[in-house]
Structure formats: structure tokens, C-alpha cells
Image (tube, rainbow, N blue to C red):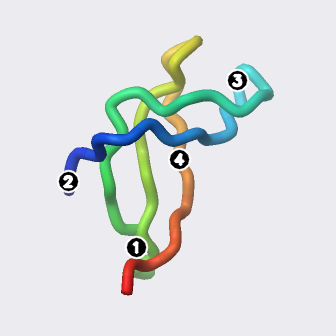
Amino acid sequence: MQEVGEMAEAYCVKCKAKREIVDAREEMTKNGHPLLRGKCSVCGATVCKITSAKK
């Protein structure tokens, strides 16, 4: 897991809107796809965004 410096956006299910990810970190799903996981900047719920693989 690595910390991500730039701000990314993900859809928050609780707010029902796109929000910035706070404390974003890179992770891998069980089947090997990369994703960003962090907290919603407004409500604090956990949000995830699937990202593309870096080549």
C-alpha cells in the first residue's frame, strides 16, 4: 500500500455525489486490479475508485 499525493475523486454512496478522497492510498483488489481507497471529504464514509493499471 502506498500513499497518494494528488487529490482524486470518487462517488460517495452516502452523499450521492462525487467527492474528493481524503487519505487516499493505492491498494489491489482480490483479483489484482488497482484501486484508490480513502474517506469522503464531507461525510467521512469509505470511498473507493478503481484505477487503471500503470504500464
| Viewer-nearest of discs 1 and 2 | 2
Residue name at image x 61 percent, y 41 percent: 10
Q: Are marks 2 and 3 in contact (CB under 8 Å)?
A: no
Q: Earlier in the sequence, mark 4 or mark 2?
A: 2
Q: Which residue is mark 3?
A: 14
Farthest residue to the top: give it: 42
Residue flagged by tag 1: what amino acid is it? Lys
Q: CB under 8 Å between callouts 4 and 1?
A: no
What label does residue 48 carry, if any?
Answer: 4
Q: Circle 1 sits on which residue?
A: 30
How far is mark 4 from mark 1, CA to CA?
14 Å
Q: Amino acid at mark 2?
A: Gln
The x and y percentages for residue 22 are: 41, 27
Quadrant, the N terminus: bottom left
Q: Which mark is residue 2?
A: 2
Question: Where is residue 11 shown, x and y percent of the image?
Answer: 68, 39
Residue contact between numbered discs 3 and 4, judged by CB atoms under 8 Å:
no
